[in-house]
Image (tube, rainbow, N blue to C red):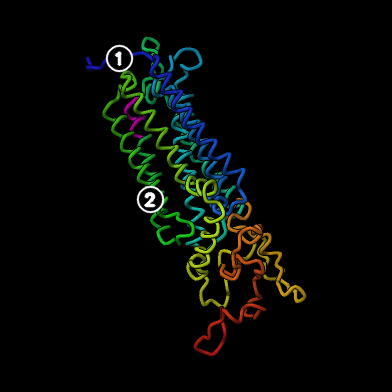
Amino acid sequence: MYHIKASNPGKDDTITIAVCSGLLGLTAMLLVYAWCNYNYRPIRAKNLTWTTLIYCATVLWFIGNLVTNNHVRLVGVWSNCKLWILWFRVLFVYVFATMTIVRFYALDRVFNQKKPFTRRSSLISGAVVIVFNVTYCLVNQLISSSLTLEYVPDLEACKITMAFRIAAVSVQWLLWGACGVLIFRLRNIQSSFNEFRESVAIFLVIIGLLTETSVTNLYYQYYIFEKKRRIQKTYVDVVASVLVIWLFIGYPVYKSIFDRRNYEQMWLERLAKDGPGNTYNINSNPQGTTAYAKMDENLDSGFNNSHLNYEGNGINSAYVNNHRPFGDPDPFNIESEMSAHVPFNDNLLPMALRNNMHNPLLNSPSLFAASYMDSSSDGRHVL
């Protein structure tokens, strides 16, 4: 009737599961290595917490694919279509997308909005991700199975309605469209972080995946009965999602293995050359407010905790020690763990990242401020 050469799950499906599991295992090793080398500054700048959560979503998405793409016989526990397709496949495809959005939003907040992405921001973002995705799945759970998806015992397969397919694919396009807007806003991030080029590469991978998903689900409705198409669908999903994670952290991990000291030295020097006026937008602003010089969560000024250490010819600041632009512990606090084997000139760094970093009192000079002051039109000196 439908001119389909149907085939049951077999050896090729088992091989597909094994290969995809191997790719996910290799990516897990990448993340474990990154966490073991978290103090390596180019890795610390990659927001490992959210990247790891994105990986977890990828694994659960793959588990949902085992049922969605008919790689296992749908009997017993596997016959619960709404559990595996809605609460695993669909849910974690959306979680993957929304967590990626949050990761890009964190960069946008720090570099474009000049606001810190604090632990509170991270928790709020996580709550939004959970509420949005769970609400969508809960609504579909409550809708009649005949209108969404249901199990067909005679075929040992899940029947997915066209309305459900269109809704699921449309939401994916909306989510990644929002991600594209954030990526466009990140186009001016300086080369030290290399995020814009990585983001564009990730976006292109996802657009390719979405195009393939749309064609497969809307044009080849019964692809799960065709061995070649269902295997192709699973490989595309896993390779694309794993590639996103490798694009996030693969390069600094590679450099930490094969060119550790030289790359870190180059990374720090490039960061310094980008300059506070570029990377952190520190300009002729008498308030001196940047992502590293903001009021804290309790509306108490971090400047009030600053004090001079004349004996050590340096300045200490409780604000600098406690302030974190991201949820991870100081991903850009590159002054705190400078290894003795890295002969980096601290004076090349942006002021916010030096060993003797200090946030001066508003409109007050400091030990180091004079060399960075410019004269304004009315004769005042401002940073």
206 sits left or right of 95 in the view: left
Q: Give the range drawn in magenta.
A: 161-167
Disc 2: which residue? 200
> Residue 348 sits in which quadrant?
bottom right
Task: Quarter of the image for the C terminus: give it.
Answer: bottom right
Task: Quarter of the image for the N terminus: give it.
Answer: top left
Residue 258 vertical position relative to residue 153 in the rendered view, above or below: below
Mark seen at residue 6: 1
Looking at the rendered structure, the kind of residue marked 1 is: Ala
Q: From mark 1 to mark 2, how far is it between C-alphas?
A: 39 Å
Q: Mark 1, residues whose alpha carbon is within 10 Å: few (<14), some, or many (≥20)?
A: few
Position in image of residue 328 (x %, y %): 61, 50
Position in image of residue 234 (x %, y %): 39, 28
In front of the other: 309 or 89: 309
Q: Does the magenta stretch include residue 166?
A: yes
Position in image of residue 101 (x %, y %): 46, 47
Residue shown at the point (59%, 51%) measured from the top left: 40
